[in-house]
Image (tube, grey):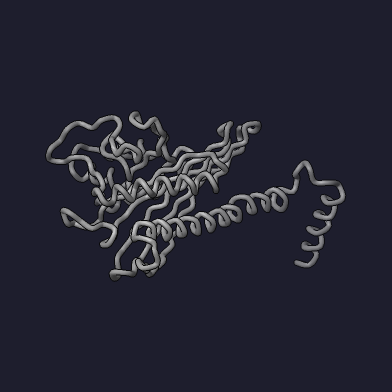
Amino acid sequence: MSYDDKFDASLDLLRRLDPKSISDNLNTICTLIQNGDDEGEELVQDLLSSIDTPLKVSKCTQSGKQYLSCDYNRDGDSYRSPWSNKYYPTPAVDDDAPPPFPSDLLRQLELKANDSFDVYRDLYYEGAGISSAYLWDTSEDENPDSLQEGFAGVVLFKKETDDGSGKWDSIHVFEVIAESSTSFLYKLTSTVILDLQNKSLSSLSLSGNLTRQLESTSSIELDSGLNLETNHLINLGTLVEKSEYNIRNLLQEVYFDKLKDIMLKDLRSVGDIGGKKLEDLKQSEVIKGLQSL
């Protein structure tokens, strides 16, 4: 099989397996396709960067704060903390391939982004959950002016219910592209992974993910009293807020309204349907049958 065939087959297989076990399934497939050559390693890296899995919670030893781990702050088996800018566990020293870090200017924006989205999390997630933001340079210059030339990053949110019956993971990957000195294009790809389980009915669960994209072009007026950093944070925050609002509405329609239709219209024998309502449903079916004759 060619490289593309293996990649497509892996994606196709993951789409058909239980979404609750996406992390285990992805690890198993990566183990199978690793054969020690460069193509196998490249295929594994492409799969890890293409498949969104539930976020993991780690703890920053230096700051004592929790942060979220994903492929975007990973280097090997280590993950960078947005609070201390250090990798945990400490990666092996390799002068030829040092772990990636944002430039100094972008690091300052990353700190402000984490503080800003932590406020967003507190407001929109009812004070619960964890948020993390990571930025990286897209310019090939050694000393880039990232804020003016553009950059990329990811904003992460994770919340679980106290009993573990509900889990919500939001992954917002964005790119900021400079179109002129005062105009920037913001591209956002948002994925929400939802996992709901009924603890009293172990056989009833609802899991899956939804991905949507948004784009927005904004003109920045630096003479308005807001610097470039603040403008970027406002525009990104507005876009993330809009994306999460749209996805929540879609999840409401796809998950819960559809489930209600199945329970009340397709299964028919729902225990809490009263006798009169059940009788009306039967009559309606009889009428439809007669009309089709």
Residue located 55% across and 41% down the image: 127
The spot of residue 191 in percent (x, y) is: 45, 51
On the rendered structure, is 134 left or right of 250?
left
Percent x, y of residue 284? 80, 59
Which residue is located at x 43 percent, y 49 percent? 116
Q: How many marks?
A: 0
Q: Residue at x 72, y 50 (%)?
A: 264
What residue occupies the far left of the structure in this picture? 96
Q: Does residue 6 appear anywhere in the picture? A: no
Depth check: give the residue in front, 28 or 105. Answer: 105
Pick the front one: 6 or 72: 72
Quarter location, residue 141: bottom left
Residue found at the far right of this picture: 276
Q: Nearer the viewer, residue 70 or 222?
A: 222
The quadrant of the image that shows the C terminus is bottom right
Seen in the image, is 1 located left or right of residue 207?
left
Q: Is residue 103 visible?
A: yes
Quarter residue 186 falls in? bottom left
| Residue pictured at 74% horizontal, 48% vertical | 268
Residue 201's x, y, as percent? 64, 33
Q: Position of residue 22 (x, y in %)?
A: 43, 40
